[in-house]
Amino acid sequence: MSNIYGDWLKEQRETAGLTQQQLADRAIMTRSHIAHIEAGRRVPSKHDAQRLDRALGTGNVLSSFLPQEEVAVADYFESALQLEKQAVMIREFALSFVPGILQTKRYARAVLTTSFPRVSEEERDRRLVTRLERAKLLDDPETPVFWALLDEAVLRRQIGGPDVMAEQLNHLAGLGEIGRIQVHVLPFALGVHPLLSNMLTLMWFEDQPAMAYGEGLFMGKIHDAPAVVQEVQHRYDFALGNALPLKESLALLRATARDYERHDRPNNPERRGAEGLA
């Protein structure tokens, strides 16, 4: 995304003789949100842009010329995508796939290639770019705080082949080992758990209430009612309490990646046997 908008906001703020904190106080926003907008990492909501216009006396310039990002996502995910960019904490539960924000390029391509109904290569590549752009949220070393709760099926379901899976699981383990994300695995041995039927995202913000997003086949829904969000959080917490601890989860990710790496080696006897039967 071009940062003309963020640069112009910074110029108007400095012309007015305001620090980021002073502008944030006037606009009833947070300093970090102002910083993210000026750096081009986030786009303000229409309501935020109107408050900035009032705080800076810029008429309706900031609200009228909001940058329109070209994104390729399902219609029902568009609102959740915008909220994701503003969140200071995200907690994901994944049942079948690695969460999009954590996917490697090859894993994401494999997921999108097998989508149904099929899409053109051009549309697939557009969706791939959007998915990889989402991953850049984690370039910030602190925000958002990110927790990933993964059903063990995510590790075992082979997407794109052994080599792709090994790379993906090592990527997850690496993010966990440097402390950028918290990752926990719900083992098969646990059996039924409260999140078994849903893909789920919980998001917290500095200047608005927490929200939950649930997704199923061809549908997704944002929940902002406090009672519903609290109930979803309770379910997440209950499942998290039964998950493997961080250290054990990281060890399982690395061990499973090694299994995939061994399977992918040309001299693997199991692979040779399978090829001989083909």
Image: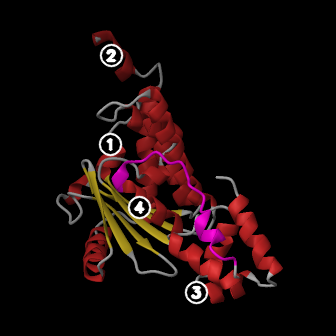
Find the distance from the CA under tag 2 to the CA under tag 3: 66 Å
Q: Earlier in the sequence, mark 4 or mark 1?
A: 4
Q: The residue under label 3 is which amino acid type?
A: Ile
Find the distance from the CA under tag 4 to the CA under tag 2: 49 Å
Circle 4 sits in a helix, a strand or a loop, which is it? helix
Task: Please tell me the numbered disc located at residue 273.
Answer: 2
Q: Earlier in the sequence, mark 1 or mark 3?
A: 3
Q: Earlier in the sequence, mark 4 or mark 3?
A: 3
At a point 48% along the width and 65% down the height, the residue shown is 146
Q: Earlier in the sequence, mark 4 or mark 2?
A: 4
* Residue 100 position in % (x across, y down): 44, 50
The verdict on residue 171 being magenta is no
Q: Which residue is mark 1?
A: 156
Lateral position of residue 28 relative to residue 274, left or right: right
Q: Earlier in the sequence, mark 2 or mark 1?
A: 1
* Residue 157 position in % (x across, y down): 32, 40
| Magenta-tinted stretch | 58-76
Q: Residue furthest front?
A: 59
Q: Which residue is mark 4?
A: 79
